[in-house]
Image (tube, rainbow, N blue to C red):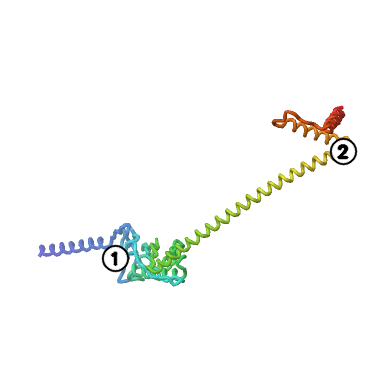
Amino acid sequence: MNDLGISGGSILLIVLALFIILGVFLGVRIVPQSEKHVVERFGRLRSVLGPGINFIVPYLDRVAHKISVLERQLPTAQQDAITTDNVLVKVETSVFYRIIEPEKTVYRIRDVDAAIATTVAGIVRSEIGKMELDQVQSNRNELTAKIREQVAAMVDDWGIEVTRAEILDVNLDDATRQAMLQQLNAERARRAQVTEAEGSKRSVELSADAELYAAQRQAEARRISADAEAYATEVVAKAIKENGIEAAQYQVALKQVEALTAVGQGAGKQVVIVPAAALDAFGDAFKLLQGRAK
């Protein structure tokens, strides 16, 4: 009997020890840095365990969900959208997100990836429907920022943070692409014609400016010559006014002497025939010169 009692007590102690060990094992939870664990008690949310060593009530609490908090990328998706000028485009998008509140993600949405993809598709169609094709092509950064902002606001209730939302490409059908290519070639031809016309216009303007400048310089030269002649006439008139007829005779005699001197210095002129009146002029000029010297 004693052997049986000892055996029964030993078994009880062993069972109790195993129960305690199992309780410790179930009550201690080590959570990796890249995860968060959602704990439930009798089917209801109890707590969310962060990275490190955590303790729960064994046999009452259980880890119902192990959620990775690493950044995730949705598969590249294509959405059809129609612009305001009725052009059908295919938009390729890529979205990156991570779960920051797993308790919301677990109990509010079933398929996170599908929900985000549907949300992005709707926002892309809505935003592109407000723009023309040229605006979609030229304002891609602005469009991407709007899509990212709206997606982030809509998925906030799911405990999700959208880290990146990019428009990878905007594709057109063949007919639209050919039409755009023809329009681009026509625009290039128009710009070339405008550039050529502006060059011709500028050339004409420069030629006219050059002719105007030449005419102005010639007129300036004529004005200076006229001013010089007027000044000389004014000097002679002043001299006549101050010195009387002698100044006029002096000027006339001086001109005669200069003329005869020029004739005498001409090439091949060995003999100069001087009229008697010229000799008188020489005499008068000489007297006047002497008079001026005194």
Residue type (three-letter) at the residue carrying disc 2: Ile
Which residue type does callout 1 highlight?
Answer: Val
Residue occupied by mark 1: 63
Q: Residue at x 82, y 41 (%)?
A: 234
Helix or strand or loop: what does disc 2 sit on? helix
Dot 1: what SS? strand
Corner quadrant of residue 121:
bottom left
Disc 2: which residue: 240
Residue 209 vs residue 41: left or right?
right
Relative depth, front residue between 251 and 268: 268
Q: Position of residue 20 (x, y in %)?
A: 23, 62
Mark positioned earlier in the residue sequence (1 or 2): 1
What is the count of numbered marks? 2
Above or below, comparing residue 31 to residue 116 in the picture: above
| Mark 2, other Cα within 10 Å: few <14 / some 14–19 / many ≥20 | some
Q: Is residue 256 visible?
A: yes
Q: Which of 277 and 175 lies nearest the eye of the viewer?
A: 277
Q: Which mark is residue 182?
A: none
| Residue 217: x %, y % from top left | 68, 46
Q: Give the left or right position of residue 255, taking residue 165 as reference.
A: right
The residue closer to the viewer here, 24 or 243, is 243
Task: Locate the N terminus by quadrant.
Answer: bottom left
Q: Residues within 10 Å of mark 1 (few under 14, many from 20)?
A: some
How far apart are the two marked residues, 1 and 2, measured between alpha carbons? 130 Å
Q: Is residue 80 depicted above or below 34 in this figure?
A: below
Is label 1 in contact with label 2 (beta carbons under 8 Å)? no
Point 81% across, 41% down: residue? 233
Q: Is residue 231 left or right of residue 199?
A: right
| In this rendering, the label closer to the viewer, 1 or 2 | 2
Residue 161 can be seen, yes or no = no
Give the quarter of the figure containing the C terminus. top right
Q: Position of residue 195 (x, y in %)?
A: 52, 57
